Image: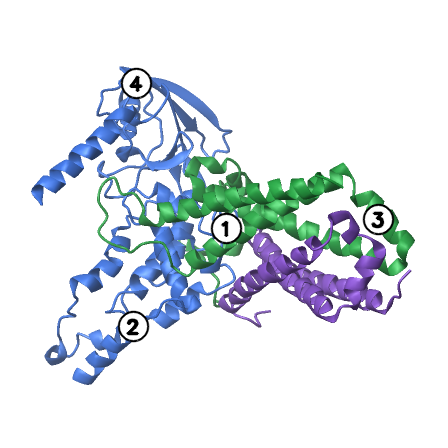
Chain colours: A blue, B purple, C green
Amino acid sequence: MIDLIIEKIEKMEKKHQKKETVRSSVVLKVYRANRRARESAHYDSIEVPVERWTTVLDALLYAKAYKDSSIGIRYSCRMASCGSCGMKINGIPRLACYTKVSELEGSTITVEPLTNFPHMRDLVTDFSQFFAHHRDVQPYIQNEEADIKDKAKLSEFMQTPEDLDKFLQFSYCIKCGLCYSACPTVATDTKFPGPQALSQAYRYFIDNRDAGGKERINIVDDRHGIWRCHFAGSCSSVCPKGVDPALGIQLLRGHLLGFSKNEKKVADLQERLKKD
Amino acid sequence: MAMLRESQIMKIHYITGIAALFVVAAHILMRLIMPYNLSLEYDNVIANYHNMPYVVLLESILVLIAIHGFNGLRIILLELRQSKAWEDGVTVLTIVAMMAVIAYGTRTIIVANGLGFE
Amino acid sequence: MAPGDVYALCASGEDVLMEVADRNNREGIKGWLNPGRYGWERVSYWLQRLTGVGLLAYFVGHIYETSSLTQGPDAWAAMLELTQTPMGHLILLLVIGMSTYHSANGIRLIFTHGGKGLGKPGRPDYPYDAVSLNYRQKSGIWIALILAAAAMLYGASVLFGGE
């Protein structure tokens, strides 16, 4: 088992080593504009020294510390956990903390704010529409049986590893908005929930503790809902956490089309009801 | 405006798409049983319109593709802009266009069916 | 609040209906350009849409074209003169390619939209290659493209080949 894992890691390292280019410095082309002040956009070119392990976020923070302190940027954890530093790097939405300079081609790196999010300043965008769509699909477990007021009835919701695997992947979402920025439907449709919200709808739909499936399906089965996904796959190709939103959306749509059934979940819930 | 759920509309979209594939294939194959240029001669074309199974085939192509095509157009237009006026306009426009195309095509089929040979 | 409406909580604390929401920085139709940057699935999306619109235009044109039948042999002959030209044949060739691609890729998409052929959700590992963007999907796109090319070649042999 361990041998297999080591072999896998070595293979992966080899695959990634090929792509790396070692440079001593790069030029950051940073998008600059303040929307409220109605400034017109321009790019600032800033040269920063880099090492093999320098990430785009490191480079930006170096520029902010030593070259131009006025660069607007949002970040927090620096380790792809918080989802704050999403931006377009060389035209593709990526997390700045998760993109090494050595992985990118060319000695100039263009950093721009995420598209499909209203712009605020420099690399910072407004996430309120994105969060509104997330909130709209009711991203929480709904279950009358889970009323914890009655302590005597209080019990754990047992889940098998198989039950867990059905949704675990989708629960890794960090709401960084990269998928929302890459989606071609979101690019023109403000009412479309986007890959993030739709994959979260599936994450709760397929969870066998949840009983709100029907209502959630009614929300996404709309003129601007799940059917406006055309499986361009861009969301999954940019996701930094392997959530694969496109997979979740198609699986949920399978239930809407009647290709897939959620009978096991229904049976589980009925069983639970009987027990109580 | 919501007479059908979006999932029902999309089921219709998929079914008309698959059905159209078969009838269009039949339509093209019928054209290939004789040399291409010959198949376009007036008498040969009119003869097709007197052949009842072929008439049914043509009418079903007309209906299936019109539904599938104009629903596709509706989807694209709905994604472009969002406002009540635009969305209602797009829905009405695509339904009217679909019906107009079906009516116009059906007229050709009926009239050609009544025509004699040269 | 009507069902289906989405409200965004803005920085000022008020809920704003998404219909009138800020469209600033939306990529727009520009987002449809340069499909290659996100891979084959994006190219497939773009081609499916383009061929769909093209085929609808041809469909409407074809119904207009055939309606000249109703005005007798002369009108039909005049229409043939207009359409049976090298340019008309080129358009027809394009239609053959478009319809083949749209059909083949469309069948793949119907299965995909039903959640078939995508793989199962699991526990993702670095480098997090998405299971839904697998080789079954990519080869489906390639097969659609190859079929379209083959159909166009056959169409060319019929249209431009012998009399």
Judging from the image, mark 4 belongs to the subunit labelled A
Mark 2 or 4 closer to N-term?
Answer: 4
> What kind of residue is marked 2?
Ala
Contact, mark 3 vs mark 1 (Cβ under 8 Å): no
Judging from the image, mark 2 belongs to the subunit labelled A
Image depth: mark 1 or mark 2 in front: 1
Q: Position of residue C97 (x, y in %)?
A: 60, 44
Number of other residues with Cα within 10 Å of mark 1, as a class: few under 14, some 14 to 19, many 20 or more: many
Q: Are tags 1 and 2 found on a single chain?
A: no
Image depth: mark 4 or mark 1 in front: 1
Q: Is residue A180 visible?
A: no
Q: Position of residue C21 (x, y in %)?
A: 50, 51
Q: CA distance from mark 2 to mark 4?
A: 53 Å
Q: Which residue is identified by label 3?
A: C79
Q: Is residue B11 above or below residue C94?
A: below
Location of the C terminus of chain C (image quadrant):
top right
Q: CA distance from mark 4 to mark 1?
A: 46 Å
Image label count: 4
Image depth: mark 2 or mark 3 in front: 3
Q: Which residue is identified by label 4?
A: A48
Numbered badge on residue A211:
2
> What kind of residue is marked 4?
Val
Kindly identify the residue that appears in the image at 55 percent across and 47 percent down.
C101
Numbered badge on residue A114:
none
Kindly identify the residue that appears in the image at 66 percent across and 60 percent down.
B94
Judging from the image, mark 3 belongs to the subunit labelled C
Image depth: mark 3 or mark 4 in front: 3
> What kind of residue is marked 1?
Asn
Numbered badge on residue C105:
1
Mark 3 or 1 closer to N-term?
Answer: 3
